[in-house]
Image (cartoon, rainbow, N blue to C red):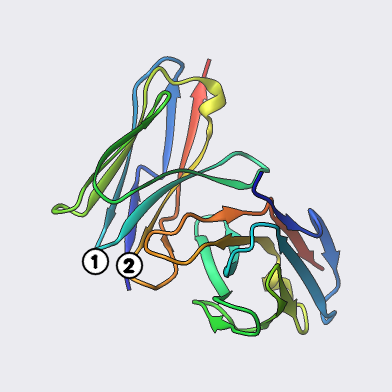
């Protein structure tokens, strides 16, 4: 069965901390994505990657960076966490091609205090 | 960039009712997705379609490419259908663009 695993379900961090959110998929998918989801705003794309060591900015990349050293792992990094980064973070993966189906992780609810 | 609008934002229905959620988009697409998110849960893909109609159990998704519009129907709704339903579209090689979602509550 297809699986996208996010390392933490809930995370509480302090302002200014460096935060790592990890995502691993076991489907050999080329494409991986990081989204944040906020009430009333829906899903917003932070960064995505179409291959190892490749990354592209999404709609809201400010304050974030990513790392894709291995095909199965895509990490989201908050260099210096701020309270406005409190959110639900969702990782997804897909196979490239027209209309590719997305597979989502179960999400990490991050609270920055 | 494609603009995706969903309606209604919130919907409350009685168990057994027929439900329709609408999605419209602004630019031609290669595929449209309907996704479901239960409270506290991850997101699962319900349908991916580029034309016509698809059916899975009590769920039916339709798309009208000319009108840039899709509908998700739920027949004989049940409280377990309570979730957020999200429409998303592909245009060429760009990442999916999402609607803001429709929150459905089905009351027994």
Q: Residue furthest left?
A: B66
Mark 2 or mark 1, which is nearer the start of the sequence?
A: 1
Q: Is residue A84 left or right of residue B2?
A: right
Residue in the picture at 60% in, 60% down? A92
Residue in the picture at 73% in, 64% down? A23
Tell which subunit mark 1 falls on: B
Residue bearing mark 1: B27
**In the rendered image, which quarter is residue B13 located in?**
top left
Secondary element type, mark 1: loop
Q: Residues within 10 Å of mark 1 (few under 14, many from 20)?
A: few
Tell which subunit mark 2 falls on: B
Q: Work out whether residue A96 or residue A59 is closer to the camera in this orientation and state it.
A: A96
Image coords of residue B41 (percent x, y): 66, 43
Residue bearing mark 2: B91
Image coords of residue A79 (percent x, y): 76, 84
Q: Is residue B60 left or right of residue A109?
A: left
Q: Work out whether residue A92 or residue A26 is closer to the camera in this orientation and state it.
A: A26
Image coords of residue A68 (percent x, y): 69, 79
């Amino acid at each position: 069965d297809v699986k996208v695993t996010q390392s933490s379900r809930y995370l509480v961090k302090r302002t200014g901390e460096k935060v790592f959110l990890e995502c691993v998929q076991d489907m050999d998918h080329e494409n991986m994505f990081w989204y944040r989801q906020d009430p009333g705003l829906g899903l917003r794309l932070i960064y995505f990657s179409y291959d190892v060591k490749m990354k592209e900015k999404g709609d809201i990349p400010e304050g974030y960076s990513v790392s894709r050293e291995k095909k199965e792992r895509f990490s989201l990094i908050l260099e210096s966490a701020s309270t406005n980064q409190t959110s639900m973070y969702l990782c997804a993966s897909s196979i490239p091609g027209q209309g590719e189906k997305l597979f989502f992780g179960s999400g990490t609810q991050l609270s920055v205090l | 960039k494609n603009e995706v609008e969903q309606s209604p934002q919130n919907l409350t229905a009685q168990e057994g009712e027929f439900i329709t959620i609408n999605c419209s988009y602004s630019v031609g697409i290669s595929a449209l997705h309907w996704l479901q998110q239960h409270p506290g849960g991850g997101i699962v893909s319900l349908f991916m379609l580029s034309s016509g109609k698809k059916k899975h159990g009590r769920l039916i998704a339709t798309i009208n490419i000319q009108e840039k519009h899709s509908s998700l129907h739920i027949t004989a709704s049940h409280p377990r259908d309570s979730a957020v339903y999200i429409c998303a579209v592909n245009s060429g090689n760009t990442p999916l663009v999402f609607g803001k979602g429709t929150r459905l509550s089905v009351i027994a």
